[in-house]
Amino acid sequence: MCAGVSMFPFMNAAVKLLGAEYPVAQIVWARFTGHLVVMLLIFLPHYGRRLLATRRPAVQIGRSLLMLISNLVFVVAIARVPLATASAIGFTSPLLVTGITKTKGNAIVGIRRWSAVVIGFVGALLVIRPGAGMHDPAVLLLLLSSAAYALYQIATRWVSFYDDAAIGIVFTALLGSLIMTMALPFVFVMPRSAFDFLLFASLGLLGGAGHYLVIRAFQSGPAAVIAPLGYIELIGTTILGYAIFGNFPDLWTWIGAAIIIASGLYIALRERHRRAAR
């Protein structure tokens, strides 16, 4: 999981750089189609036609649609929001995963972990600062992106009991690639430099590898423990946001992020304690 999320800051930085000059649909197309092509090259020789032989086609298609929605609104929004702020708003996604995911034994998340979720969400509000930022449509789009990604994570955890991770990672990109390929002829802009071309190429590689590792993580452990590990993304986004765009989080952003991370760590430790007690 840690290796997977460590790739996302680089991908987000590439998206922000490209978003200043290229259409949203083209960026999203590169993200999903590159992801799909790379994963097919890796897995098709071994799996063959079995790579699309899912036992839960409706869930896999639904996952793909959720990922497309999450990426579309994220790319639209990130052009107006600093990387670290976007990452912190994205932390509401694992909070939602923890809040609505059932634990082992089909029990709902307990009052202690629900309290940690609420406290973590308060930390997210410190980052967002409703009085200053909630009126901005970009913030609302980032919240929508987080909600869609939370549902994607939950669906990933559920379908991982039926399908191999390789099948899941291909289906993640399948619908997005097909839809964006149909839209591409109407919006395509030729990359203006070799650097821009490399940024486009990196989107699919980083996204595909990152999500493959996330899927493998969800196959290995409960979502309530795994999802909060995504908080380490803040380190990478902060460094890249400052180095590339000159954006450094203010004090309230750091305080809010610290609260969120502390809540996530408590949730992980609480779940580990519950599992050890059984």
Image: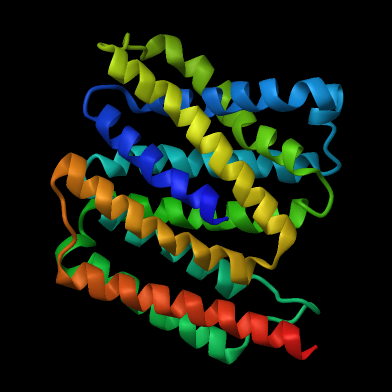
**Which image quarter holds the N terminus?**
bottom right
Please state the horizontal and vertical placement of residue 154, each as a whole percent of the image.
Answer: 64, 59
Please state the horizontal and vertical placement of residue 265, each as a whole percent of the image.
Answer: 49, 77
Q: Is residue 109 visible?
A: no
Q: Which residue is at 85% across, 32% downward? A: 53
Q: Which residue is at 49% across, 51% downward? A: 5
Q: Which residue is at 79% across, 20% downward? A: 45
In the displayed structure, does residue 48 sit left or right of residue 172? right
Vertical arrangement, residue 158 with respect to residue 252, above or below: above
**Which image quarter holds the C terminus?**
bottom right
Please state the horizontal and vertical placement of residue 224, each as a whole percent of the image.
Answer: 61, 71
- Colouring method of the image: rainbow
Q: Nearer the viewer, residue 60 or 120?
A: 120
Q: Is residue 174 visible?
A: yes
Q: Quadrant of residue 74?
A: top left
Total marks placed: 0
